[in-house]
Amino acid sequence: MKQTLVLLLFTISISAAHAQSSCAKLIPLCKASFIEDYSWDGRYWRAELYNGEKTEVYYTFFKGLRYRLIPCGSSDEKSPLRMRIYNANHVPLLDTGTQNARPYWDLELSSTQLLIIELYYPAGNGCAALIIGHKASDAIASKE
């Protein structure tokens, strides 16, 4: 019994390590493909999502900056990764499920505020990752 439990725990830990490893492999691909002239500080968010789970990222967006949000992932059912953005009061601002599929989303706010970014798959299990880049907004860049 004890050997079976140890073997089971070992198998689970190997599976979890493999899943996180496959998630980590997404980051360089997403960054290289879509970051372009946006600055990136090296931070990213990733999560394994199972059976309708969602993950949330709380991020402060500053006035005067343009942001590029790059949600990327892969699922076992080839389901597209979806993203919803809410303000701090949970008022929905964007739902990519109602938009045409795009590899990234550009965002510029008129005031500094905390937003909640939710990532999910409509079906299946998969790895979800998010990279956020930024640059000076066009209005600020034209003043310099």
Image (cartoon, rainbow, N blue to C red):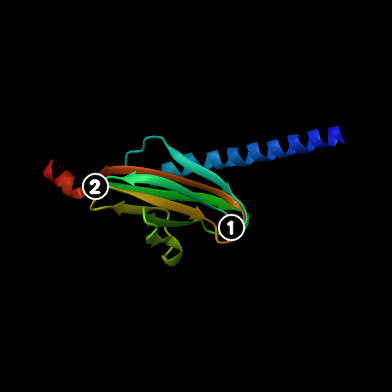
Residue at horizontal 46%, vertical 64%? 97
Q: What percent of the width, then of the height, locates residue 72?
A: 48, 49
| Amino acid type assigned to the residue bearing label 2 in the image | Lys
Q: What percent of the width, then of the height, locates residue 17?
A: 64, 36
Residue 38: quarter of image: top left
Q: Nearer the viewer, residue 66 or 109?
A: 109
Q: Nearer the viewer, residue 43 or 142?
A: 43
- Judge whether 56 appears above or below 28 on screen: below
Q: Secondary structure at mark 1?
A: loop
Q: Quadrant of the C terminus?
A: top left
Dot label at residue 52: 1
Residue at horizontal 27%, vertical 43%? 135
The Cα atoms of the two marked residues, 2 and 1, are separated by 33 Å
| Residue 92 placement, left or right of 144 | right
Looking at this rendering, what residue extends furthest in the left direction? 143
Looking at this rendering, what residue extends furthest in the front direction? 89
Q: Secondary structure at mark 2?
A: loop
| Amino acid type assigned to the residue bearing label 1 in the image | Gly
Q: Nearer the viewer, residue 20 or 87?
A: 87
Q: Quadrant of the N terminus?
A: top right
- Judge whether 75 appears above or below 31 on screen: below
Answer yes or no: do the residues labelled 2 and 1 have beta carbons within 8 Å? Answer: no
Dot label at residue 39: none
Q: What percent of the width, then of the height, locates residue 79?
A: 56, 59
Label 2 Cα neighbours within 10 Å, binned few <14 / some 14-19 / many ≥20: some
Q: Which residue is mark 2?
A: 63
Q: Nearer the viewer, residue 142 or 127?
A: 127
Report if residue 133 is visible in the image.
yes
Report if residue 36 is visible in the image.
no
Label 1 Cα neighbours within 10 Å, binned few <14 / some 14-19 / many ≥20: few
Whichever of callouts 2 and 1 sits on the residue coming sooner in the sequence is 1
Looking at this rendering, what residue extends furthest in the right direction? 1
